[in-house]
Image (spheres, coloured by chain):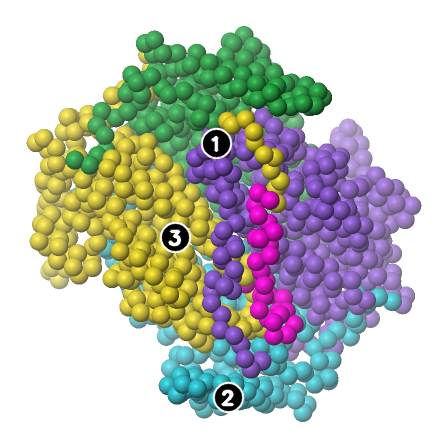
Chain colours: A green, B purple, C cyan, D yellow
Amino acid sequence: MPKNIEPVYYSDYLQLDALLDAQQPHSKKYGAEAHDEMLFIIVHQVYELWFKQVLHELRAIHREFHEPKLDDKALYLVSHRLQRVLKIQDLMNDQVAIIETMTPQEFLEFRDYLVPASGFQSIQFKELEIRLGLTRKTRIAFDQQSFYNRLNETDRAYLEHLEEQPTLFDRVDAWLARMPLLEWQDFKFWEMYQKAVNQALDADEKIIRDNVQDEAQLRQELEGIQRNRDTFAALFASESYELLREEGAVRLSQQAMLSALFITQYREEPAFNLAWQVINAFAELDEKLTIWRYKHAMMVQRMLGTKIGTGGSSGHDYLRRTTEQNRVFKDFFAMSTYLLPKSALPELPEHVRQALSFSLEMGQRT
Amino acid sequence: MPKNIEPVYYSDYLQLDALLDAQQPHSKKYGAEAHDEMLFIIVHQVYELWFKQVLHELRAIHREFHEPKLDDKALYLVSHRLQRVLKIQDLMNDQVAIIETMTPQEFLEFRDYLVPASGFQSIQFKELEIRLGLTRKTRIAFDQQSFYNRLNETDRAYLEHLEEQPTLFDRVDAWLARMPLLEWQDFKFWEMYQKAVNQALDADEKIIRDNVQDEAQLRQELEGIQRNRDTFAALFASESYELLREEGAVRLSQQAMLSALFITQYREEPAFNLAWQVINAFAELDEKLTIWRYKHAMMVQRMLGTKIGTGGSSGHDYLRRTTEQNRVFKDFFAMSTYLLPKSALPELPEHVRQALSFSLEMGQRT
Amino acid sequence: MPKNIEPVYYSDYLQLDALLDAQQPHSKKYGAEAHDEMLFIIVHQVYELWFKQVLHELRAIHREFHEPKLDDKALYLVSHRLQRVLKIQDLMNDQVAIIETMTPQEFLEFRDYLVPASGFQSIQFKELEIRLGLTRKTRIAFDQQSFYNRLNETDRAYLEHLEEQPTLFDRVDAWLARMPLLEWQDFKFWEMYQKAVNQALDADEKIIRDNVQDEAQLRQELEGIQRNRDTFAALFASESYELLREEGAVRLSQQAMLSALFITQYREEPAFNLAWQVINAFAELDEKLTIWRYKHAMMVQRMLGTKIGTGGSSGHDYLRRTTEQNRVFKDFFAMSTYLLPKSALPELPEHVRQALSFSLEMGQRT
Amino acid sequence: MPKNIEPVYYSDYLQLDALLDAQQPHSKKYGAEAHDEMLFIIVHQVYELWFKQVLHELRAIHREFHEPKLDDKALYLVSHRLQRVLKIQDLMNDQVAIIETMTPQEFLEFRDYLVPASGFQSIQFKELEIRLGLTRKTRIAFDQQSFYNRLNETDRAYLEHLEEQPTLFDRVDAWLARMPLLEWQDFKFWEMYQKAVNQALDADEKIIRDNVQDEAQLRQELEGIQRNRDTFAALFASESYELLREEGAVRLSQQAMLSALFITQYREEPAFNLAWQVINAFAELDEKLTIWRYKHAMMVQRMLGTKIGTGGSSGHDYLRRTTEQNRVFKDFFAMSTYLLPKSALPELPEHVRQALSFSLEMGQRT
């Protein structure tokens, strides 16, 4: 600790003079101040402060994934910070309830003074999306054109530059793809897994053939089995996997997907535990972002009905299109498509299990 | 208070013997008990207990709306109980986080033992939907066929009988439609309102014509004004309103819609305050139900990926179709389509204002 | 709507340049920036923004209570805005979870650079407390000396001036005390109520005397009845009531307390409904503030253990002393002390009931 | 998967017949059913279902800690299940809002019919407390006598038997105390730590002596340093530590406390990560239980004012006494008392660091 610490005063430290002077209702410029415009400003400012914090965490996480090696201490930090982001997202989702205390009429009192400003112009939110991996290509069509047109030169340039950087999605994909244990000495995860999948599906098929009498039902159930076989086949064969990827059905590279599957299935193994926490946190982050978009869209609909939003957007339409499509880590979210129950899961070979353990067992009674 | 009250013991009062004996994991019947099946059972049982409570409130509310007269004391009770329902819904929505602590693998350990049971078979939830007003006709196609096929005779008969009763939606519509002040002595709300709407739109049009130079933009903005004129025209003309209703764009009767609009616009009037709280609570109830369906569908997707649910449903598809369409009180939710800002709102005639007031002013300094 | 509205850009409107430039971690001045100081700053800034919003609402509410007459339209606004404050409080209470994502070690990385700043120096929070009615006299001893010493001249002067203004508590007390119906024509609420109380207690006593055999138990139960009689006696007799008030057992004036009781007991009466919502909202506001203090104190304890806080406070001690004592509207909160079950409640005389009704019944079937 | 799975029907699986028949309002026995008694019953039944689930998890955790060896796979499960318990606690804490929708008057309608039943008679909640480690000895005096008197023979016997079993606290203490690395080869954690603590305090003292001019302030600050020295001295010396333990200032054994400190300070080390999650989860579990008790006590106060609860308890008093004292894992909660900032923390010797790592580094770029 340095010797001379200047004494600090609460309001100076937090720069409250600047912070609490930054609420200037526009309604005042055109007549009497609309009481509720203050709420409108503050709610959006709070969102922007949280966005800043979330970006602060995501940038730090981004840097870790950029390191040539991501050891467990680093992974611990990544996981810890993602947990913080998730908590902030919970709060942001609940915050929608605050703006909903403003009735549509109260909003109408000052709404016309804000034209054409729009939440689409939040550079921090767009940075957040882009950084995660929601680039122009993956974004829904409406968003693609729309929001860039609304930005000033500087903002547009900033985001366009960002679009060219590797995203968190890219980094995470690369990290997973280079996981050392996917293929190690004589062990190949996918060979082992594929065999287990086939056994499970064969067993299911036998049960069906032995038990189902009704021909129509039999056909239907066997078709179900076949669909499952096809799904897994596409996972293991690089060419068909690439096809899925081009269609947009999956986004992770095949290697990364297999690693994620390996980690998810064997997440109790000590060496996989943190990695699994990270994968899971990204899936939750996406889910919470989706809920945020959804609640936000419903709030807009309630505020404006079927009218058009300040920035020309219709909440209703936006809703349908973004909540489903604007997901970055949907492969983690839908990982269960490929999961086997533990009873159908093969034991790992001893030398692999060893490699996933600590050299020293904790908590051993001596 | 009666003289002889039998002494009560906590666990007898709550019938804990029955309650806490009602969790019988099926996995135990086929091998070792899956640890997480207990959670699965309890989470669903808690939902069913809350459904029972919500139905207890909705039935009581239903009865009040069935009375020939719904005075303000009754309306107070309705509002009070709807607030309780909303709080329970908040809790039910948050409860999704509990089931999400079960990983997909943990679910796979006992999932096959539950076939073909499905949440679609929850009679209480269906009663809740039907009672609110989500009848076969208004339900999305998927639901129409689907869930009745899965029920046993008794359950199906119970719900089918219920489908023939007047719903809460019907009762609320009738209550609004008979509101005495919509047309009273020489006062006609819609005439007054229509005039105000026209003035507001004329003023908007003039501003546009005076200020917008660019011809393409001018055309676009004038089209916007015209769309607004059409929207309002349809509201005031019974024939075009009926058309909207047949298309499913609105569901309330025209009289009820106008009353709801009147109450919403003038909700600060003492006599409208409780009525507005009730309208608003129904809109929130619908919104929270939609969020419940949405979160539930996401949870199913996470648990099963793109596989098919225990009852044959695909969460993903269901999501798209029910969250938007299965709303009962969407007209209250989208009421802002027709709202005017207060500055554009005419003062009520004195004799109408009087009729909406208390005969005795509270809080008057004497 | 005025003719010429200047076009607005999102980041200008929200003054994001100032807002997002106001986070300057002090750790950077003495070495490497501590990653988590950003969170610490932003969490506190968000609190300050919410405090500003809460003050914005409370000041407006204060003004309404200052008006010579508080009619139902005004009361509606007061109630509406208090509901908003409650929602913001919920969010502020949940926000403690965000700062808890910072571990004590992470805090230690920059804690020494903040000495002697302290949350006690938040002028807005102190204004909030003072405005509500937590003046020096009613504040716990620790607070009395403590926080004024930590403030700079300007801040201290500002708060000291505020301490001399009438508080919201004062205004609410005056509003209740002047309620017209407490004594109206030949009707005196307290006479009617006192009689009902006596009847209820007499009946209870008779049941006890008739049924309880065991002498020790009988004595104990009769003592309970007597304590209840004393409690009510103190409520109705001005002198003994004043004694209670001097002891700090109650804070409302006797007239205000009786009005609050009247309103609470008969809150279904149309003319009482809004007043009751307001009373109830103040009780909840107090309760949520108490929970905020409590969670905050626990967070401090977790962060610092039994060490002393940056401002010299010990969370642990503060906890015990403030959560119970720093309540302003505790009389509303504990109103149930004086409530009777409805079955023991007398019907209001017809002319009083009429005075509490609307001149026009809503929702009547014609 | 076994061949023949019996088809399952939703309401049979959940035993809805029993579950939904277990709500029998007592008010009905003495007159008209009080509408709100249903809520009262269901709220308590839902709590009991959650208690059952929490016990299901805690018993499984208890078993893991009972095993001679607690490896990382087991620790993962413990951590995973504690996370679930925490989520359930969040929901239970929020559930207080539901019972608060019942007004005191509504409660008074049926309250007298429940005498002398009381929440103190919840055997499951008491089992939960006892299992965690809240035994008679550590429980506050009021609880010690009180609740056993209210139980029937069977229930009392069940809990008394439970009081004699080792608690989760005991198991966790033993697990920590036997941690292999606390003293390993030539490494002694406490020697290293004690040295670091002394250096940090010496440095602080020097800064104070060099900078503080005012004699009174100097004395005060040096006293602060001395108090810190004493606190740490008591931690390292077994005799003085035992004294603290007898006074109730700490509860963990010295070995366990040192291990917990070691793990907390170096929790980024791969081998410590899960152990730290477990320690932290127990601290949170305690905190959330405290918040539950607190909210519950406030709700009781609101419902009954200063009257006495159905079981003879005064919420107000109970509040003060249990929230602070009934904590089991308070040592984890207050661990920060002994923490050093990372900058003052010594690097671990290389062979210790190695022992805490995986044999194989994940995520290495090859």
Q: Residue placed at 31% from the left, 69% from the top? A: D145
Residue identified by numbered label 1: B109
The residue lying toward the viewer, choosing from B70 and A156, is: B70
The percent position of residue D5, horizontal first and vertical second, equals: 56, 31
Q: Is residue A36 left or right of residue B40?
A: right
Q: Is residue B36 left or right of residue B246?
A: left
Q: Residue placed at 70% from the left, 23% from the top? A: A214
The residue lying toward the viewer, choosing from B92 and A350, is: A350
The percent position of residue A340, horizontal first and vertical second, equals: 48, 24
Q: The numbered mark 2 sits on a residue in which chain?
A: C
Q: Residue placed at 20% from the left, 58% from the top? A: D249
Q: Which residues are magenta?
A: D12-40
Residue identified by numbered label 2: C210
Give the crowd class for mark 2: few <14, some 14-19, many >=20 residues within 10 Å.
few
Q: The numbered mark 3 sits on a residue in which chain?
A: D
The Cα atoms of the two marked residues, 1 and 2, are separated by: 62 Å
Give the residue type that dot 3 points to.
Answer: Lys
Give the crowd class for mark 3: few <14, some 14-19, many >=20 residues within 10 Å.
some
The percent position of residue C332, horizontal first and vertical second, equals: 50, 72
Give the residue type that dot 2 points to.
Answer: Asp
Q: Is residue C31 left or right of residue C272?
A: left
The percent position of residue A171, horizontal first and vertical second, equals: 42, 21
